[in-house]
């Protein structure tokens, strides 16, 4: 190798090293989710331990990965002291065998929201079940104050498979079914009488 090539290689060696270290695989060890940007402790090349690494997430989506999840880390300008995480995956819990075009949210407990080709599937096996919070809100428009609609469901048919349904919150206003005794307060039929007919559908009007 001639002298000029030797000098050139020495000059570009730091740049070459920085380029090689710009993108790397890493393993997440600790997650700090308290701040505006999530910060991680990760282990990278040859056991390199990096603290306070910022994780950039997509707007509108956020998650707290478990320890030993895998990440892609990039060193800004090749500077390992300014490393950020741009992607996180966890092969232990990722949903598999989705159809092309499908999308899903999932966690390590088996809960998921799956946008399938033929509809949307929501699953949870946790004690709290699924809760939809949509309290009435005051809406001011053109000096007119109204209460916003809580929840609107537009469907040709709604089917609920449940052994117990509460209307008006748990312990709310009771309802009667076929076979239940209802209290007639006055008239010649005063007393308790069973409901003998009804419908398995709730219809408008």
Image: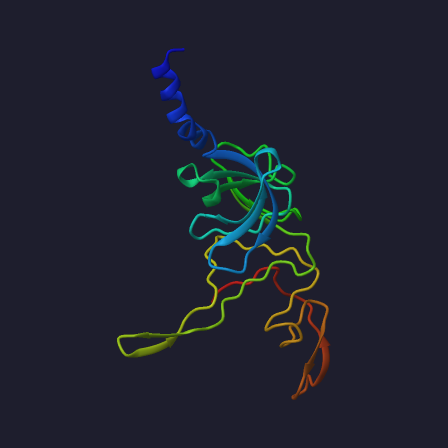
Nearest the eye: 2 or 182: 2
Q: Is residue 177 left or right of residue 159?
A: right
Nearest the eye: 108 or 96: 108
Q: Residue furthest bottom?
A: 186
Q: How is the image coloured?
A: rainbow
Query: Who's the residue at 68% across and 55% down the image?
Result: 126
Query: Who's the residue at 30% across and 78% down the image?
Result: 144
Check the image and report above or below for 57 versus 199. above
The N terminus, quarter of image:
top left
Q: Quadrant of residue 129?
A: bottom right
State the image coordinates of residue 121 (x, y, percent, origin top left): 56, 46
State the image coordinates of residue 84 (x, y, percent, origin top left): 47, 44
Q: Quadrant of residue 166?
A: bottom right
Check the image and report above or below for 205 versus 140. above
| Total marks in image | 0
Q: Residue furthest left?
A: 142
Q: Is residue 136 left or right of residue 143?
A: right
Q: Is residue 116 visible?
A: no
State the image coordinates of residue 41 (x, y, percent, origin top left): 58, 48
Query: Who's the residue at 57% across and 34% down the image?
Result: 45
Query: Who's the residue at 64% across and 52% down the image?
Result: 124
Q: Is residue 73 left or right of residue 187?
A: left
Nearest the eye: 196 or 178: 178
Check the image and report above or below for 182 versus 33. below
């Amino acid at each position: 190798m001639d002298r000029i090539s030797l000098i050139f290689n020495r000059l570009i060696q730091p740049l070459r090293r920085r380029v090689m270290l710009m993108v790397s695989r890493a393993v997440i060890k600790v997650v700090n989710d308290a701040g505006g940007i999530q910060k991680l402790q990760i282990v990278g090349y040859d056991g390199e331990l990096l603290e306070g690494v910022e994780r950039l997430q997509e707007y509108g989506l956020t998650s707290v990965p478990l320890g030993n999840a895998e990440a892609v880390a990039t060193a800004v300008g090749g500077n390992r002291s300014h490393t950020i995480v741009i992607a996180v995956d966890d092969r232990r819990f990722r949903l598999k065998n989705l159809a092309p075009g499908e999308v899903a949210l999932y966690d390590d407990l088996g809960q998921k929201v799956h946008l399938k080709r033929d509809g949307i599937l929501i699953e949870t096996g946790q004690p709290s079940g699924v809760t939809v919070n949509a309290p009435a809100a005051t809406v001011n428009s053109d000096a007119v104050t109204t209460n916003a609609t809580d929840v609107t469901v537009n469907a040709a048919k709604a089917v609920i498979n449940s052994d117990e349904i509460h209307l008006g919150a748990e312990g709310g206003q009771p309802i009667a079914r076929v076979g239940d005794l209802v209290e007639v307060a006055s008239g010649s039929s005063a007393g308790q009488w069973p409901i003998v007919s009804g419908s398995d559908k709730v219809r408008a009007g």
